[in-house]
Image (cartoon, grey):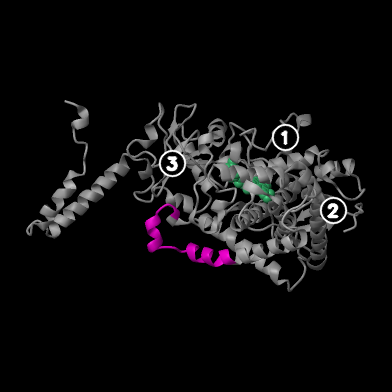
Amino acid sequence: MDSSLVSKDTSWWVFTLPAFLGTQNLCDGFLLFSLFVAFVSAGLLTWAFAVGGIAWKSGRNSRGRVSIPGPRGLPVFGSLFTMSRGLAHRTLAKLASTRAGATQLMAFSLGSTPVVVSSEPQIAREILTSPHFADRPIKESARELMFSRAIGFAPNGTYWRLLRRISSSHLFAPKRIAAHEEGRQVDCNVMLSAILEEQRSSGVVGLRKHLQGAALNNIMGSVFGKRYDLAAKNNEELSELKEMVQEGFELLGAFNWSDFLPWLSYFYDPFHIKERCSALVPRVRKLVRGIIEEHKLVHGESGKLSDNADFVDVLLSLDGEEKLVENDMIAVLWEMIFRGTDTTALLTEWVMAELVLNPDVQAKLQNELDMVVGNKGTITDADVAKLPYLQAVVKETLRVHPPGPLLSWARLSTEDVQLSNGMLVPANTTAMVNMWAITHDSNVWEEPLAFKPERFLESAGGVNVDVRGNDLRLAPFGAGRRVCPGKNLGLVTVNLWVAKLVQQFKWVADQKNPVDLSELLKLSCEMKNPLSAVALPRDNVVVAL
Ligand code: HEM
């Protein structure tokens, strides 16, 4: 018989329901109860046989030659409780280490969302560099906050490619980064003066607020061409900006259960995500629109760009098909403020915490600075290139404390992806890389828990690893076509600021608040207890602040 003539309709039984339910004696409590029990049992059986949890049902994890192992989690919720509390990178690393093959790739469920995570360099590279993993799943908060029109969450396509091209040939181009050096110097000098003042008045310095202020001003300078007097008490625009950035960080960093269980939003929304996003967006639009209007007044809508033009000037100067509508411009500009502020500030704080904990490393760094720069004054970006130990200290901090331990922003497969180890990741799977697990794996790094910058110094028998996405043993900026476009800007800023902080002061432990390396995972992984230290001005340094 022609097989196409055979009925494949498996839902015929639905049409029999009215007959059943209409039958008086059957439609009693017993029948309803039995149906309910049958339904729940079927659900539980499906879950019990689904390696990786309910989102991997029907053998979704075994479509390749090798099955993807993973924890079942709970019925309905999968591993949501595991991911929503505590330090997900550590929990996932532990889970992966207890199952054969799971460090290469582990499957788990977040509600109905199938997720894979890799904790091994080879498979991580295949995921990050695959063209079929060039999309990102978008969270409700990111969508509400307009980020689907910004670089980080725009789907892989013409619009995203246009944004990457504009940003890499302007904001992140080497000559533009060089042209903004003066701004980086100014912001750092203002920070050094504020640190000196706090040290004199309190005998101790809380570093984070200084770093966040400098990072915010720095990114505001290169993106909006605007800096604020951080010491001013009544600057309404600055307070509004800080508050908006803070609120945005919280919303984007919050673990939103309804991203994975959409029906839950009707009952449970502890963070009031939707409401808060709706309140924030008009404030962002007002502020950014105001700055765009100021630029239009000063420069007109187009014209030749100078090397140190800010990003608003760049976007306004675009013509033809490249021209962005105002709402898209606002989304792109706002995203830069977000991405550029916390990552650089938090990474610098981790570096300084390690330097306080490791006085011998700090002394070696000071020695390098004295030898190469002396006390001649201002350290420049050009000097940084001649300071291998400084660069090794920053790399070692990126290894021990990657700011995005799970690379912050996941990827989404758009097609089935066959991996070299025989596993197959089906289309529409969220993929993460556990960079923290890789950088703490003793098969990858010798003595992974020790803070040893020398491991990156060829002169000391180490290896000079490129951290910008070419070597997956240490890729804190991701890799592939969605690698962080701000990596060079971020590195230049952190290297310069650490050099200047250490040239100017000797950093000593605050006896009342010793350094605590506990982590808090939000949008980035930050120090749970912000760094407090004593900043002793170095006598032999003659730098005017
Ligand atoms: C220490 C500093 C920084 C770290 C550790 C960092 C880390 C990351 C990581 C891990 C990703 C995801 C990459 C991937 O999926 O492969 C990313 C994406 C991104 N970063 Fe950074 N970042 C830093 C600084 C910056 C700065 C300064 C900016 C801009 C001002 C920036 C803008 C972006 C953007 C726009 C994306 C999205 C790229 C896309 O999806 O196409 N980042 N970053």
| Residue to which mark 3 is pinned | 428
- SS for dot 3: loop
Tell me: is circle 3 under 8 Å from ligand 1.
no
- Which comes before the other along the chain, label 3 or label 2? 3
Single out the residue that lies furthest toward the bottom: 234
Relative to 114, is 213 on the left or the right? right
As measured in the structure, the alpha-carbon distance from the residue carrying label 1 to the one carrying label 3 is: 38 Å
Relative to 540, is 12 on the left or the right? left
At horizontal 82% and vertical 39% (from top left) the residue drawn is 387
Q: Quadrant of residue 469?
A: top right
Mark 1, other Cα within 10 Å: few <14 / some 14–19 / many ≥20: many
- What number is the disc on residue 504? 2
What's the residue type where badge 1 is placed?
Phe
Q: Quadrant of residue 225?
A: bottom right
| Residue to which mark 1 is pinned | 456
At horizontal 58% and vertical 31% (from top left) the residue drawn is 443
As measured in the structure, the alpha-carbon distance from the residue carrying label 3 to the one carrying label 2 is: 51 Å
Magenta run includes residue 281? yes
